[in-house]
Amino acid sequence: MTVTAERPAELTPRRPDRGPGSRADGWIRRAPLLPALVFTIIVTQLPFLFTIYYSLQSWNLVRPGSRQFVGLDNYILVFTDSQFRQVALNTVLLTAGSVLFSLILGLLFALLLDRAFLGRGFIRTLLITPFLITPVAAALLWKTVLFDPTYGLINFVLSPFGAGDTDWISTFPLTSVMVALVWQWTPFMMLLILAGLQSQPHDVLEAARVDGANTWGVFREVTIPHLRRFLELGIVLGAIYLINTFDAIYMMTQGGPGTASANLPFYIYQRAFLGFDIGQSAAMGVVVVVATIIVATFALRLIFRSFSGGEET
Amino acid sequence: MAEVEFDQASRIYTAGAKPAVNRLDLEIDDGEFVVLVGPSGSGKSTALRMLAGLEEIDGGQIRIGGRNMVGVPSRDRDIAMVFQNYALYPNKTVGENMAFPLKMRGVPREERVTKVKAAAEILGLSEYLDRKPRALSGGQRQRVAMGRAIVREPQVFLMDEPLSNLDAKMRVSTRTEIAAMQRRLGVTTVYVTHDQVEAMTMGDRVALLKDGELQQFATPAELYDKPANAFVAGFIGSPAMNLFTLPVSEEGVRMGSSELALPRALRSRIADAGLSTVQLGIRPEQWSVGSDATGSGVKAQVDVVEELGSDAFLYAHLDDGEQTPVVVRTGGRSGARRGDQIALTPTSEDLHLFDPSTGERV
Ligand SMILES: Nc1ncnc2c1ncn2[C@@H]1O[C@H](COP(=O)(O)OP(=O)(O)OP(=O)(O)O)[C@@H](O)[C@H]1O
Ligand SMILES: [Mg+2]
């Protein structure tokens, strides 16, 4: 992005007037892509423009004829809505928590799988499986098979210790959702980090051992610096996917009790399709998009830095 | 500083397979520069890595300074190693790379800085201390790897083909630098190479391995003059020694149609060994070349002339019906040409004789 700007001017090649590399030639090359571009604009940008338009209206579907232009009122409501703030905080907690815990667990499992032991291939397959399960099914599994207060496995296992009557999902709603998400995302992080571990040059590890590093020293001084870009990539990709979590919340808690476990996508869905408040939810959508763009620009930077191979010193 | 001892040390990678290093016996003196040399796959790297603690010792012992190293992890062996691809830490600067072994041993920061500065000074790396290895040339990386080894002041240096990634010229100059530095520091060094020129020029003593077995462990001169077997004779020296398997006759040996007289001392050694055929080794410089007309000597025909300026090598074949190849060194500008008929006579009394069945020196 900024690379072109930093390039010294005299190195920029001059564009020929005709033939390969000229402006006309560029258009000939790109023209076949135009339909795809137009399509993308129609399905992504037009709805966004409509959303902006709706966000300036007061429009509740259950009160026909209530539709009118109200300017920025909806936005003011968004920022004064304490539930919205609570839900935004939930989103941050859920995303950051899930990414962080799955990253740590993934790192541990990857370290385990990086060494040879009997049945490694089998264990690896088992560890990857959660990632292959449909998110809705996984959420349902956690809700009914594991967390259920009467027939859940967790309470069953805990009952001999006299602690078997907790309703996990209503007592710790956000944490329960997070547990299910971490369970599902740990394999992704594990695979990513495992790829990083296995791409370590052997002789560098051996050199560190000869140079007097113990296992922890090798890990801290050689492995972690090597893994840094893999960890960054895991954080960014995980955050991009997990910030949009909807299925797990919908299946497990419906955002409740109250808004205790709702995140932004779920809350907006509730306001639009359960509360029928189109104007208000459109305004929220716009706020979330803008916030996401700001965060994503930051995140994309990180990705590009990871891929470009250049490191800051 | 310490002496190093391989005592019947073996390494078996896969159970049942041939050992990569088989009952190796070496006694290396304190401060000595020993080169392990041998063809590819002969177990040189394995032997070195056993000493470094990077491979198990499956049989026998390895001792450093009299202490048995079986089961001792690398970090407790007080050794420093230079790897073939240098194995620098890519995320650390040159200075941090060189300081790393000190840091891992808990040397205080100021002392680390002083030592790294001093080593960088010696190696001409002072201006690169803040760079990452990626921004260095191959030769500079090689020196960083050397620096990382010497700041430690270890008991033993281990080097596994440290010059093989350098160009021919750098290799020759770095070769002398390493040898000189080792003499100055007086640290016991084990150096692995597949290049016999490196082995002969650098080592106080050279250990020649083949298929995991030690063939000979001696000074370069002794290796050249008294090879213990036909393999050593063929491996050391460039171009290689001429080896012929010949029937023994009254006056010496029969070479094609002609008779090659051998000195009495050699004849009695053959007789003592009770051999009817013998493997005769003659180095390229142990021939004298006459033109065909002079009559005496073994007849041969020149195939290729390699003119090197100071001397020339003639690649010829004998007129013995089997076209046995032979290499002869003559003075430069010998005037020999392809197709010339020549007569060869051994000049030296010190020809090499080996038992054709065992390859052992007679
Ligand atoms: N990790 C390993 N597992 C199994 N066999 C191995 C392993 N490493 C080496 N070997 C075998 O051990 C033998 C000796 O290998 P080694 O690397 O010591 O040879 P080398 O003398 O260093 O050769 P080169 O000059 O090619 O480096 C070879 O036959 C090789 O195939
Ligand atoms: Mg090797």
Image (cartoon, rainbow, N blue to C red):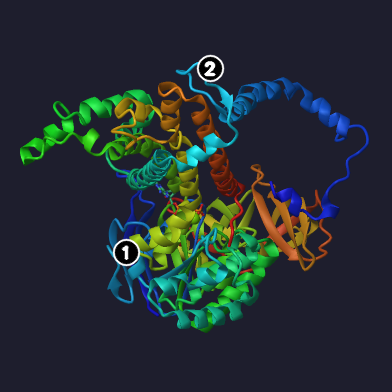
Q: Nearer the viewer, residue B220 or A178?
A: A178
Q: Nearer the viewer, mark 2 or mark 1?
A: 2
The answer to which quarter of the image holds residue A117 is top left
Q: Residue at x 74, y 56 (%)?
A: B314
Image x and y of residue A157, in percent:
12, 35
Residue underneath mark 1: B73
**In the structure shown, which secondary structural element does the residue marked by tag 1 occupy?**
loop
| Residue found at the very far top of the displayed protein | A64
Q: Residue at x 81, y 63 (%)?
A: B334
Residue underneath mark 2: A65
3D distance between C-alphas at marks 2 and 1? 82 Å
Q: Nearer the viewer, residue B357 or A94?
A: A94
Q: Is residue B187 visible?
A: yes
Which quadrant of the rendered structure holds the N terminus of chain B? bottom left
Residue type for callout 2: Gly
Mark 2 CB lies closer than 8 A to ligand 1? no
Residue type for callout 1: Pro
Q: Nearer the viewer, residue A121 or A110?
A: A110
Q: Is residue B275 visible?
A: no
Position of B150 compared to A181: left or right?
right
Position of B311 compared to A306: left or right?
right
Q: Residue at x 32, y 57 (%)?
A: B56
Residue B120 lies, with reference to residue A55, above or below; the image says below
